[in-house]
Image (tube, rainbow, N blue to C red):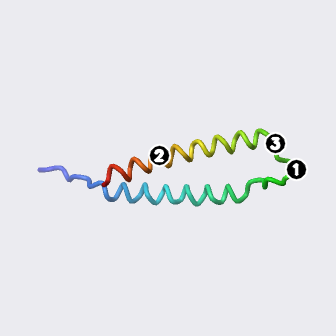
Amino acid sequence: MAEPTLEPAAPYENLHLVARDYLDRLRQSLDALKQPDDPKLRWRNVHTMAQVNARLAQAGELLDKLNTSTK
């Protein structure tokens, strides 16, 4: 008896939805951050924001690879 084969569409769809949920959460978190004119803003906030941007750039590069591999 042949084993059923799992097609990539269902797991991919699930992961796609999870990624969108992460993006929504990131947007909410960004909206809740201190504003540039906040007197409580510190250099550690700048450092952390730079780390966030670096990781977002890496995520963008991964998505670019995914887009390139599907063409």
Residue 3 in the image: state x and y as whole percent. Answer: 18, 50
Q: Residue furthest right?
A: 39
Please say if 42 is above or below 7: above
Q: Which residue is drawn at 50% across and 47% down?
A: 59
Q: Residue 39 carries which label?
A: 1
Residue 22 drawn above or below residue 50? below
How many numbered marks appear?
3
Q: In which quarter of the image is residue 37?
A: bottom right
In percent of width and height, residue 62 lies at 45, 46
First in sequence, mark 2 or 1: give its number: 1
Residue 65, which numbered label? none
- Residue 71 at what x, y percent from top left? 30, 55
Name the spot of residue 29 as percent of width and height, x first.
67, 55
Instruction: Determine the CA span between mark 3 and mark 2.
Output: 29 Å
Residue at the spot x=57%, y=43% of the render?
55
Q: Is residue 41 left or right of residue 59?
A: right
Q: Is mark 2 on a helix, strand or loop?
A: helix
Q: What residue type is labelled 3?
A: Arg
Name which quarter of the figure residue 28 lies in: bottom right
What's the residue type where badge 1 is placed?
Pro
Name the disc covering residue 42, or none: 3
Q: How far is mark 3 from mark 1, CA to CA?
A: 8 Å
Residue type indicated by callout 2: Glu
- Point out the tag, 3 or 2, that comes first from the N-terminus: 3
Q: Which residue is drawn at 88% across and 50% down?
A: 39
Residue indicated by mark 2: 61
Separation of disc 2 and disc 1 at Cα? 35 Å
Give the residue drawn at x 58%, y 60%. 24
Q: In this view, does 52 lie above or below 34?
A: above
The quadrant where residue 23 appears: bottom right
Side (left or right) of 4 relative to 10: left
